[in-house]
Image (cartoon, helix red, strand yellow):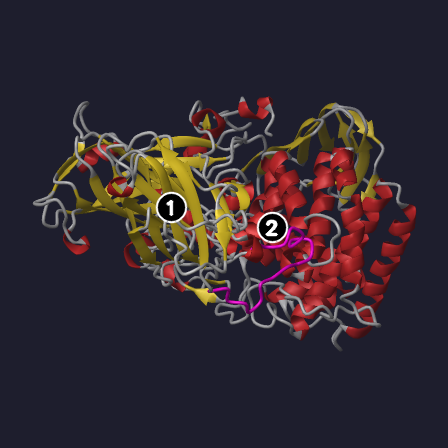
């Protein structure tokens, strides 16, 4: 569970504030002015309320037939249903007793793609899911009061498994849910939309079979020989049920939150209400939804009749001014029920034209509260389709956020870079939900490649360990490990490098020890994917993904090459981790494997010009991993990376994900100024186009304008499905910490650190990074020379490298000459700080 100290941090502002205002919003509609401190609504003091204080998990359980349940060891064994369709009907029965028949009774059912429901032998409902809908689970409700009896009752259901949803679940429960092999049912003594203690709900006392008799639904049928149903547990009992958008349609289940207890909620009113359309009715006081109306003046909608068609329905569009994660909340102030639809969009055009989760109906009980599905969006279109005269206390965002403090900071003489840092931090925070996701809209799941970038942002800005620890643990899975992380060999490699980065930042030996056995198993499995030459050969027929770019996301030579370099980094880092664990034998063995991978790359993958081809991604990771030797940097720069930022129309696209490795490699090679120019083009380009969070895919040459979202490409597709808040796009934030402030942890838990501040073309820069030992602050400014300030926490030894005008220049630390060594051809002076405190460093 999340520690009490973390829960007390709700709403605390970051160290350091920014006075500049970011011009954010759709530039076609006019930018929305939001200060950097106000960008993240969860940062407002007192904004957050812990989910654990608001909600208790609901009693209904997900059940299925035991004969068709996913095996217990499915995740560890890499289980996959393959081409099996599993579309045969399943049969469920439950006997229950009522002392009296309630006035109202509603049955809710969710999970199957089709179902027929019998209550006491009477058919009370049936449905078939429209598989073109983007949601997997859908919730259906039926009035069953007239079919209930005082005394004994029998509920019988024929069901076909639900549609599969995308993603790679890591546990039995998650795999079974995402394969649609679940059923949830409850009967509540209330009208549709109202909550009440259930009369009946699914659990392991139900009976379930694949082989019924012809009269299986009759009340008199003897189900004594039917097996008990297989239960996965309560519908809100596991974090695994909240992944991959699998529970998106559960929003219509009364009282369902689907939010982990360590998360928190907040409310946010729309900044603007636009696209107000009266239809066949009348919209009154839309300004009330922004808080701009007089007290007591409520938003309301009139309809000419109880139901109107969707396209004649009154409509509003809510604009929250920035990307947000959560759901729409509607609060009724009327004595009659109402019906609305909601459709979300990260962009205005997505909301209007092709919302990712479709057009979703919501039933609002009298004086009740109802919610739309959980997702990420900026815009929400509400259409009012039922209820003749409905007043609303509120229609607002019910935000969902991980309660964490912005501890790290960055500011400089370039306001655009400051905004990029903040937006990168906010993008990563949006992804901190029920574990650390790739994105809060799509896929809402754990992907290790994404975490390798967003995890660095999280470590630099928030210093959080709870979600990082849990996400790394679940991605690796249970022992024994004999499959790739996420089914991608490169993501197995990134698990090792990500774990290394995590250990250097947090230094939890207990966490590393908990992964020791599985780390060795993972590296052993990765070794089976190499051929006799120690080249990655995809021998296990996995998915060699490097980036969403031609020849880099399938079993192609370029993808194999990129994976080779990722594997080298993983085996080298794995050996380092094992040395921390005093596992010398395995450390030596895997270091030898790393050396063999590097030798094979040098022997077989170099081209005649001395580089690894001309692709940015592969050459960048060759440099960053250490496969490429410094003597090869000039050829790599000449043949590949010198073109970064100079190709206007690049068919070989690169995502923000791998661009982090590109700009990091450019810095390592000594081309920091070129890297910073590319940052200003690339992440700055998103900023100029109105980004309030960074996008999954982008190129500065792509179409700009009101429908910019339609031109974005990633995930082998283009258009509105592409996410506008993707954690792997936040790499500009750690880059500024690593290359401008120059902070790079080298020992466990910042026991040792390199500090190499570099203004490049800035006048000044300053910031701070959280460590387990306290805040580490760095500042640098130009004057007659350079002045560097460092605040070093206790227990940290810092190797410091500062700019000087020549190799003979003296370094003064707090006014006293400090012995130093020349570095980088005499352009820098290096020395070591071993004592905590404040240091002012000058040269003369």
- State left or right for residue 24 relative to residue 796: left
Please, what secondary structure does the residue beneath circle 2 have?
helix
Q: Locate residue 639, reporting x and y percent.
A: 67, 71
How far apart are labels 1 and 2 at the CA level? 27 Å
Q: Locate residue 631, reporting x and y percent.
A: 80, 63
Residue for point 36% across, 38% down:
152
* Residue 537 higher or lower than 437, as above or below: below
Q: Decide if residue 238 is in sight here.
A: yes
* Residue 429 higher or lower than 601, as above or below: above
Magenta segment includes 315: no
Q: Is the Cβ of the residue at disc 1 closer than 8 Å to that at disc 2?
A: no
Magenta stretch prevailing secondary structure: loop
What span is in magenta?
A: 69-87
Residue at the limit of the structure toward the bottom, as seen here = 608
Residue at the limit of the structure toward the left, as seen here = 304
Magenta segment includes 76: yes
Please tell me which residue lies in front, 580 or 314.
314
Residue under pointer 1:
155
- State left or right for residue 717 relative to residue 106: right
- Residue 824, numbered label: none
Residue under pointer 2:
172
* Disc 1 versus disc 2: nearer the observer: 1
Q: Earlier in the sequence, mark 1 or mark 2?
A: 1
* Residue 613 higher or lower than 803, as above or below: below
Please, what secondary structure does the residue beneath circle 1 have?
strand
Please tell me which residue lies in front, 123 or 326.
123
């Amino acid at each position: 569970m999340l520690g009490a100290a973390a829960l007390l941090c709700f709403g605390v502002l970051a160290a350091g504030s920014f006075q500049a205002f970011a011009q954010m919003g759709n530039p076609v509609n006019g930018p929305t002015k939001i200060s950097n401190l106000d960008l993240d609504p969860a940062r407002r003091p007192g904004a957050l309320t812990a989910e654990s204080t608001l909600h208790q998990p609901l009693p209904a359980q997900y059940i299925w037939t035991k004969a068709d349940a996913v095996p217990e060891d499915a995740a560890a064994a890499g289980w996959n249903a393959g081409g099996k369709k599993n579309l045969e009907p399943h049969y469920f029965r439950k006997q229950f007793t009522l002392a009296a028949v309630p006035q109202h009774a509603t049955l809710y059912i969710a999970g199957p793609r089709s179902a027929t429901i019998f209550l006491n032998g009477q058919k009370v409902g049936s449905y078939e899911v429209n598989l073109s809908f983007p949601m997997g689970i859908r919730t259906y409700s039926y009035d069953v009061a007239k079919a209930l009896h005082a005394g004994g009752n029998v509920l019988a259901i024929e069901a076909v498994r639900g549609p599969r949803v995308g993603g790679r679940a890591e546990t039995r429960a998650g795999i079974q849910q995402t394969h649609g092999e679940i059923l949830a049912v409850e009967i509540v003594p209330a009208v549709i939309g109202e909550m009440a203690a259930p009369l009946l709900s699914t659990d392991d006392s139900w009976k379930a079979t694949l082989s019924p008799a012809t009269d299986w639904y009759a009340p008199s049928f003897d189900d004594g020989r039917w097996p008990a149903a297989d239960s996965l547990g309560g519908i809100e009992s596991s974090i695994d049920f909240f992944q991959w958008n699998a529970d998106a349609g559960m929003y219509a289940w009364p009282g369902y939150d689907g939010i982990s207890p360590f998360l928190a909620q907040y409310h946010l009113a729309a900044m603007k209400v636009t696209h107000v359309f009266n239809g066949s009715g009348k919209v009154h006081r839309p300004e009330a939804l922004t808080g701009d109306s007089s007290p007591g003046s409520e938003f309301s909608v009139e309809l000419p009749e109880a139901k109107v068609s969707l396209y004649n329905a009154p409509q509003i569009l809510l604009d929250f001014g920035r990307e947000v994660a959560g759901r729409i909340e509607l609060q009724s102030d009327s004595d009659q029920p109402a019906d609305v639809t909601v459709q979300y969009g990260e962009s205005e055009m997505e909301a209007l034209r092709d919302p990712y989760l479709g057009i979703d109906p919501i039933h609002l009980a009298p004086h009740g509260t109802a919610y739309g599905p959980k997702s990420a969006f900026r815009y929400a279109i509400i259409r009012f389709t039922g209820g003749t005269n409905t007043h609303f206390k509120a229609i607002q965002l019910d935000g969902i956020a991980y309660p964490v403090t912005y501890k790290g900071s960055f500011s400089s003489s370039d306001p655009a870079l400051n905004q990029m840092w903040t937006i990168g931090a906010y993008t990563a925070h949006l992804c901190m939900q029920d574990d650390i996701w790739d994105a809060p809209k799509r896929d809402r799941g754990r992907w290790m490649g994404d975490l390798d970038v967003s995890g660095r942002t999280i470590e630099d800005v928030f210093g959080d360990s709870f979600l990082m620890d849990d996400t790394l643990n679940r991605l690796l899975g249970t022992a024994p490990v004999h499959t790739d992380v996420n089914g991608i060999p490169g993501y197995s490699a990134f698990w090792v490098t990500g774990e290394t980065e995590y250990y250097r930042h947090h230094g939890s030996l207990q966490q590393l020890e908990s992964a020791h056995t599985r780390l060795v198993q993972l590296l052993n499995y990765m070794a089976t994917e190499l051929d006799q030459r120690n080249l990655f050969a995809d021998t296990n027929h996995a998915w060699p993904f490097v980036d969403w770019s031609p020849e880099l996301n399938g079993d192609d030579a370029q993808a194999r090459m990129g994976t080779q370099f990722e594997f080298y980094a993983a085996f080298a880092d794995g050996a380092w981790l094992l040395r921390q664990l005093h596992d010398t034998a395995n450390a030596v063995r895997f270091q030898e494997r790393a050396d063999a991978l590097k030798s094979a790359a040098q022997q077989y993958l170099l081209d005649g010009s001395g580089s690894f081809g001309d692709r940015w991604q592969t050459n960048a990771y060759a440099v960053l991993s250490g496969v490429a030797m410094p003597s090869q940097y000039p050829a790599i720069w000449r043949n590949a990376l010198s073109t970064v930022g100079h190709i206007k129309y690049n068919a070989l696209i690169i995502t923000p994900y791998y661009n982090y490795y590109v700009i990091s490699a450019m810095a390592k090679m000594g081309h920091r100024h070129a890297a910073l120019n590319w940052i200003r083009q690339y992440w700055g380009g998103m900023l100029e186009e109105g980004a309030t969070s960074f996008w999954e895919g982008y190129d500065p040459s792509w179409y700009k304008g009101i429908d910019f979202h339609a031109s974005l490409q990633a995930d082998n597709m283009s258009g509105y499905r592409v996410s506008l808040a993707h954690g792997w796009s936040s790499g500009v934030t750690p880059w500024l910490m690593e290359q401008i402030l120059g902070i790079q942890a080298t020992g466990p838990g910042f026991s040792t650190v390199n500090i190499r501040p570099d203004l490049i073309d800035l006048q000044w820069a300053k910031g701070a990074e959280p460590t387990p030992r306290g805040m580490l602050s760095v500042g640098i400014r130009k004057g007659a020379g350079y002045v560097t300030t460092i605040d070093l926490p206790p227990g940290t030894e810092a190797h410091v490298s500062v700019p000087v005008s020549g190799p003979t220049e003296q370094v003064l630390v707090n006014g006293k000459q400090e012995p130093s060594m020349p570095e980088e051809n005499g352009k820098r002076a290096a020395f070591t700080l071993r004592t905590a405190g404040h240091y002012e460093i000058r040269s003369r």
